[in-house]
């Protein structure tokens, strides 16, 4: 029985290695093909925009608006899948520079504050005038995912975006008065395709990849 168990363990190890290699191969394929895959979707977006300019009848506008919303949702889902594939394939490499955080915070505030206020949420942004060593593009992606979640899961109340200097570090916070996450699920939400508040799997609410991307980027930036 002991020898049989040893053989079974070796078989499981071999199967696990094959599965991991297949997953890496899949990620590398998607990452390499991302440019070609994005092109038809980008063309579809342009065609919808062109069609929108030529509409004269209200009943046709309703149909085109629905197409536009569907294309926007598809683009968001597609980009999330490609982003996480590029991260898993090891293609994304941080470019660390000294970057002033305040302009980035102002950019995000200008973009997201109107959306938050249109939902009746109080928006507050504060950022000390400091520079940090980071990859500004990857940091922006992290913050966008967190802010989008804050807005999506806060039915009423407030959202505060802050960056404060603390000795030789910067502390970045996205605070909200939303529905929250129970302690037992606070690690699970960083796994792929996990959506605690979307049991019906409504794809307009995303794929559940935002926090998985955040986790990978945070680890990448150490």
Image (cartoon, rainbow, N blue to C red):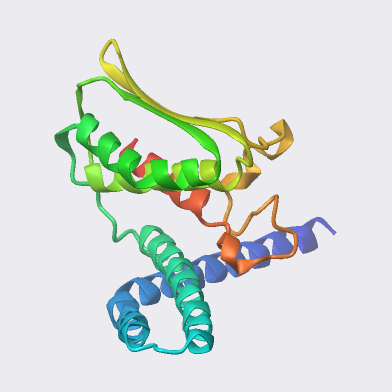
Name the outermost residue toward the top. 167
User: In this orientation, does residue 215 appear?
Assistant: no
Q: As rendered, which of 70 and 191 lies closer to the eye?
A: 70
Q: As rendered, which of 48 and 28 lies closer to the eye?
A: 48
Name the outermost residue toward the front. 57
Location of residue 131 (image quadrant)? top left
Q: Is 195 situated above or below 77?
A: above
Where does residue 147 sit, x and y in percent of width and height? Answer: 45, 42
Residue at coordinates 47% horizontally, 83% vertically from top-left? Answer: 61
Q: How many marks?
A: 0
Which quadrant, please, contains the C terminus? top left
Name the outermost residue toward the left. 98
User: In this orientation, does residue 19 appear?
Assistant: yes
Q: Is 13 situated above or below 181?
A: below
- Left or right for 3, reference 115: right
Location of residue 98 (image quadrant)? top left
- Left or right for 183, reference 79: right
Residue at coordinates 49% horizontally, 46% vertically from top-left? Answer: 118
Where does residue 129 sit, x and y in percent of width and height? Answer: 20, 21
Q: As rendered, which of 141 and 47 lies closer to the eye?
A: 47
Residue at coordinates 46% horizontally, 89% vertically from top-left? Answer: 57
- Left or right for 133, reference 178: left
């Amino acid at each position: 029985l002991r020898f049989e168990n040893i053989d079974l363990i070796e078989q499981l190890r071999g199967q696990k290695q094959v599965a991991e290699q297949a997953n890496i191969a899949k990620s590398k394929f998607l990452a390499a093909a991302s440019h070609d895959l994005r092109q038809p979707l980008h063309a579809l977006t342009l065609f919808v925009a062109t069609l929108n300019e030529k509409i004269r009848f209200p009943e046709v506008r309703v149909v085109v608006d629905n197409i536009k919303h569907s294309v926007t949702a598809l683009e968001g889902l597609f980009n999330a899948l490609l982003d996480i594939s590029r991260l898993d394939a090891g293609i994304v490499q941080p470019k660390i520079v000294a970057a002033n955080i305040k302009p980035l915070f102002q950019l995000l505030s200008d973009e997201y504050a109107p959306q938050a206020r249109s939902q009746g949420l109080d928006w507050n942004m504060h950022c000390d005038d400091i520079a940090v060593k980071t990859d500004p593009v990857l940091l922006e992606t992290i913050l966008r995912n967190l802010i989008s979640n804050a807005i999506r899961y806060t039915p009423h109340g407030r959202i505060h975006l802050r960056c404060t200097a603390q000795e030789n570090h910067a502390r970045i916070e996205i605070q909200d008065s939303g529905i929250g996450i129970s302690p037992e699920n606070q690690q699970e939400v960083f796994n792929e395709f996990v959506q605690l508040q979307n049991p019906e799997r409504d794809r307009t609410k995303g794929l559940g990849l935002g926090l998985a991307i955040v986790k990978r980027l945070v680890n990448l930036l150490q």
